[in-house]
Image (cartoon, rainbow, N blue to C red):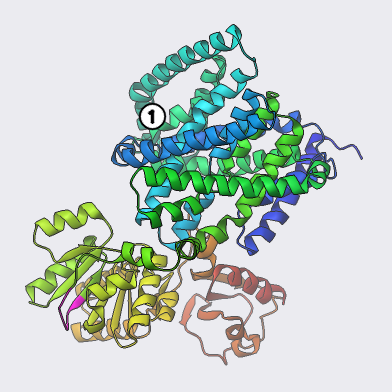
Amino acid sequence: MELGIFEGLVLLLATSVLMIAIFRRFNITPILAYLLAGIIAGPSGFSWISDLHDVHFVAELGIVFLLFSLGLEFSFPKLIAMRKMVFGTGTLQVILTLTVIMVICLSLGFSWQGAFAIGCILALSSTAIVIKLLSESGKLQNRKSQLAVSVLLFQDIAVVPMLIVFPILSLGEGAAFGSALLEASLKGIAVFALLIGAGKWILPRVFDEIAQARSNELFVLTTLLVALVAGGVTHLFGLSMALGAFLAGMMLGESQYKHQLEADIRPFRDILMGLFFSMVGMYLNIVTIWESIHWLILACVATLLIKILVIFATAKLMKEKTNDALAVSIKLCQMGEFGFVLAALASENKLISPEVTSILIGVGVLSMAVTPYLINNAQKITNLILMGDLVNSEDKMPGFKSELKDHVVICGFGRVGQTVARFLRTEAIPYIAVDFDPMRVQEAQQAGEKVHFGDANNPDILKAVNALEAQLVIVTLDEPVKATQVVHQVRILSPDIKVIVRTTDDEHLQSLKSAGADEVVPEKLEGSLMLVLHVLFRSGVPVRRIFSRIRRERRSQYNFMHGFFPGENVDIGGEKRDQLEFLHAIPLPLGAHAVGKSIAELGLSDMKIDVVGLRRNSQEIEWPSDSMRIREDDIMVIRAKPHRVEKAERYLLEG
């Protein structure tokens, strides 16, 4: 059945929604869901969209916004700080991987242009998947992860010249190729100078004016306009639109508006990038894949092994530890999302055949599918390859050993940890701290602080600070996942040590308690309590009554303070839907299911919904009893997690 572009896009979006929902449930990257949706909607599936040119331009905008976001993350100070790993390990990895794969492809009969394109495509790893998994594991700050991030950063930078070179490669060899390359280089320099000038002298003033207008719509529109105009400028010069967007993002990455720009562009980027990956999936020829399934599996295994060996050799050449080098190579052996971008561009410019494109996309899909397992088990695989824990334990052994007893261990020496340390020192209470920021540790040690460099999640570090004989362990880390892991490690070490955890709010209170924390101190709620203390005292409430109320609130784990009325900009995405509790007022008109029933009869407690208040005839009743019957025009105030709030409202109104 022949469908129009509108009907085809609607069916594609519906398929994408279904695939993402399924893939999310199994914790699989959405990129693969979009690719599968594209296969279903494309020529290999139901042919809802048979002409890829219909969606090509819109999908290309996804690449423009992706490169704009990448430019925002491209920080010159960060690059300079990590220059050895970025331009040393990163550069060497890309060049060696490209060379090895190119040699193999040339021996298989590919043209040098095709071999170069395939080498570029497979040399890149997945920034999105690797960073996400490392962040979720709470290990983004250790040496292995920093090395992986450095390599990924150079790969992202290398994408920009690759996007420029691929269209030029289609011109073939000889004078035409040389002159085109020279012309592109000169144009690139001119565009770079033009956009650098605009970013330095024009864009900051523009965004200053926009910010003063205090209009979210105007700020978002200006952000989109800047990204598209920058892409249009490079397009006029005959270069990739993505290059202009990258340069514009890079210029704005140093401004005070960086985070707001990133937040504004993210929804457009994610949606259009999803459309792009769907388009890539349409290039996948299922018949070709099925007929060449053995070659696909062989190519995927070969790619993983080649990249592991090359990245390992590169890291060793740069004098990295064997354990770190092997772990990083396992984490970065997959094909990246930019590989799909380059594969589509190479196919469009006839550098590789549609059959080869399908095989490369298949390699990307398979390698990404196994990436979560490889990253989560990288250390186990490393230990297995290196014959046990000998190298691993040597790498992890801390260079210090504390003899303190009945002391306080501070895990995390940021502002909160340092404040705690000052008060402990004033009271002559012995303490020792560990932190994973080398600059902070070095400066604090010079000032005489008892702090050491180390990962508090490492059992050897906890043993080195003699946590087993400490009277108290305080966890002040900013990352809730990492804090939970530290509490778990402390509990493994000893079930009797008292553990206090500082957290930003009450989102992770239960998970930290479940991990073994004796006390969890949510900063926002404690700050609210201190504010309440001052307000009640100034209002004439006796001090004894104030402190009694605050102690009662802490004993009940801040139960009275849980739940709030969400505003328009409250983030309830991802895991937060299962952590936050909202307050919601539900008017109950005549005919509502709840009218005439008691609160006990409604069974809301079985649905894990608390009735915290009832408004009747302009009178407020706090914590109404279960025997109270609901009347017409009552307003019930409930507290529950977001998805339960929605169900409760439907139940109370409709049954």
Residue type for callout 1: Met
Residue 373 image position (x, y, % from top left): 57, 61
Q: Is residue 198 above or below residue 489?
A: above
Instruction: In the displayed orientation, state which residue is furthest to the bottom.
Output: 627
| 373 within the magenta span | no
Q: Which residue is mark 1?
A: 251
**Which residue is rendered at x = 64% and y = 64% of the image?**
25
**Which residue is rendered at x = 60% and y = 9% of the image?**
174
> Where is the N terminus found, in terms of image quarters?
top right
Residue 10, quarter of picture? top right
Q: Read off the magenta span.
A: 402-408
Q: Is residue 266 above or below residue 440?
A: above
Residue 221 is at least partly visible in this image: no
Q: Is residue 566 left or right of residue 26?
A: left
Residue 326 image position (x, y, % from top left): 45, 54
As rendered, which of 137 and 366 lies closer to the eye? 366
Instruction: In the displayed orientation, state which residue is furthest to the right.
Output: 1
Q: Is residue 106 above or below residue 518?
A: above
Residue 412 image position (x, y, % from top left): 27, 65
**Total tally of numbered discs in the picture:** 1
Under tag 1, what secondary structure? helix
As rendered, which of 137 and 275 lies closer to the eye? 137
User: Circle 1: is it few (<14), some (14-19), or many (20+) Cα within 10 Å?
Assistant: many
Residue 520 image position (x, y, % from top left): 34, 76
